[in-house]
Amino acid sequence: MAKTETVHTRVTHEIKEQADKIYAKIGLTTSQAISLFLTATVNNNGLPFELKVPEEDEDLKFAISIATVDGVEPDERAKKIFTLYKRGDIDLETAKFALGRLTKE
């Protein structure tokens, strides 16, 4: 079947460059990889991979449960720690450490 359509999309330079390198290692051009993705989408009658909301880290869930004492909502300081973690401003270890410090007060 002759290719007669063109697909245009915008991605960051970094993503395109990284993807190009990966595809080259497996002997594909980015154009070929996109064609494979579209073909797999049609063959699967949907995306060729599962999409789901990432689950919270089990350790963070545990830390949240510790900060929620006797069913009482975490205080504003704990909520701020959760927000910083979810935004990626602090890592998991820092969030757990900070929550642990709050529960010792």
Image (cartoon, helix red, strand yellow):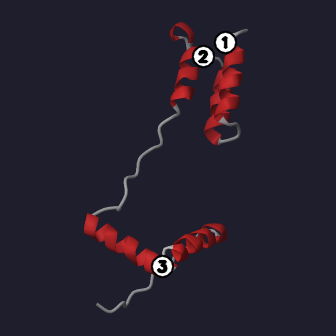
**Do the CB atoms of the residues marked 2 and 3 lie less than 8 Å apart?**
no
Q: Quadrant of residue 43?
A: bottom left
Report the front residue among 27 and 31: 27
Picture residue at 58% right of the left edge, 21% below the top: 63
Measured in 3D between alpha carbons, the distance from the residue under mark 2 to the one under mark 3, in whole angstroms, is 50 Å
* Residue beneath disc 1: 103
Measured in 3D between alpha carbons, the distance from the residue under mark 3 to the one under mark 1, in whole angstroms, is 53 Å
**Do the CB atoms of the residues marked 3 and 1 lie less than 8 Å apart?**
no
Name which residue type carries label 2.
Ala
Tag on residue 67? 2
Q: Quadrant of residue 81?
A: top right
* Residue beneath disc 3: 28
Q: Nearer the viewer, mark 2 or mark 3?
A: 3
Q: Position of residue 87 (x, y in %)?
A: 64, 41
Q: Position of residue 12 (x, y in %)?
A: 63, 68
- Mark before the other along the chain sequence, 2 or 3: 3
Q: Position of residue 78 (x, y in %)?
A: 66, 22
- Mark before the other along the chain sequence, 1 or 2: 2
Q: Position of residue 40 (x, y in %)?
A: 33, 69
Crowdedness near tag 1: few (<14), some (14–19) or many (≥20) residues, C-alpha within 10 Å: few
Name which residue type carries label 1.
Thr
Tag on residue 89? none
- Mark before the other along the chain sequence, 3 or 1: 3
